[in-house]
Amino acid sequence: MGALTSAERAKLILVQRERFPDIEVYVAALARVPRRALSRPIGERAIPEDRPVAAFVELWGPAEVLHATFAAWPTPVSAWLVEEHRPADAPRTWPAGLPSPGVRLVSSVHRKPGLDREAFARHWRGPHAEIALSFTIPVWRYGQNVVVETWGQAGGPEGGEDGFAVLHFRTAEDLSERWAKHPEEARRGAEDAARFIDGTRGWSCVMREIAWETDAL
């Protein structure tokens, strides 16, 4: 992805590590950003002790608006401009500002040493997406976000994130049973992930999402 023009649509991901008690009110009020989503961990146990994540924010809109929004963010935050791919999607049929059905598994992703980001993205969007979509228990909505630029801090103690995976399931049971009840599928997915992902790094968090949309993207 090359340099963006000021009006070009883009996506920005922000990871809030410090507590921001009014973040829902703040994100809801970002009226200049046509589409935005806020995901927060479900319970304290969902926050990894070594990589705390208080909130995961996704913003879609003109590049100049995203730049201004990031510059005005009121607390320390890590931010990445990303290129999004959606192997699985579903229309939003519930009102904006209400919790989305189901739960999301959100993970930061680091490419395997020696693999450039282009090859990493190609494998993730191709062979691995095909495997992810072949599971007996399907993912409802699936977003792959490849990092284009780092705008904020370096992503916490580790830094160097290459992408963010968002797997949204219709129910919490679908998430818990997808791998547990189908170990052969889980093994196949893990073996393929090891071909392009550094599994020793990153974090994963089970979250609940709230989304606002004033302009379809």
Image (cartoon, grey):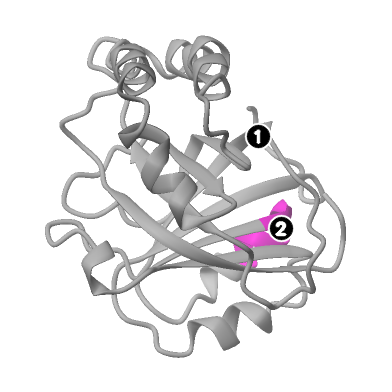
Q: Magenta residues?
A: 60-68
The secondary structure that most of the magenta stretch takes on is helix
The picture places residue 142, in percent across and down from the top left corner, at: 59, 38
Q: Name the side, left or right, on which 20 lies relative to 71.
A: left
Is residue 66 part of the magenta span, yes or no?
yes
Is the residue under label 2 in contact with that under label 1 (CB below 8 Å)?
Answer: no
The relative height of residue 112 versus residue 54 in the rendered view (above or below) is: above
Q: Residues within 10 Å of mark 1 (few under 14, many from 20)?
A: few
The three-letter code of the residue at mark 2 reads: Glu
Question: At 25% across and 64% down in the image, what residue appears?
Answer: 47
32 or 101: nearer the eye?
101
The picture places residue 143, in percent across and down from the top left corner, at: 58, 39
Question: At 58% across and 52% down in the image, what residue appears?
Answer: 12
Question: At 24% across and 24% down in the image, what residue appears?
Answer: 198
Q: Quadrant of residue 161?
A: top left
Q: Name the side, left or right, on which 188 lies relative to 14.
A: left
The three-letter code of the residue at mark 1 reads: Ala
Which residue in the protein does label 2 denote? 64
20 or 143: nearer the eye?
143
Q: Residues within 10 Å of mark 2 (few under 14, many from 20)?
A: some
The relative height of residue 36 versus residue 123 in the rendered view (above or below) is: below
Which residue in the protein does label 1 denote? 3
Q: Quadrant of residue 158?
A: top left
The total of numbered circles placed on residues is 2
Q: Quadrant of residue 114?
A: top left
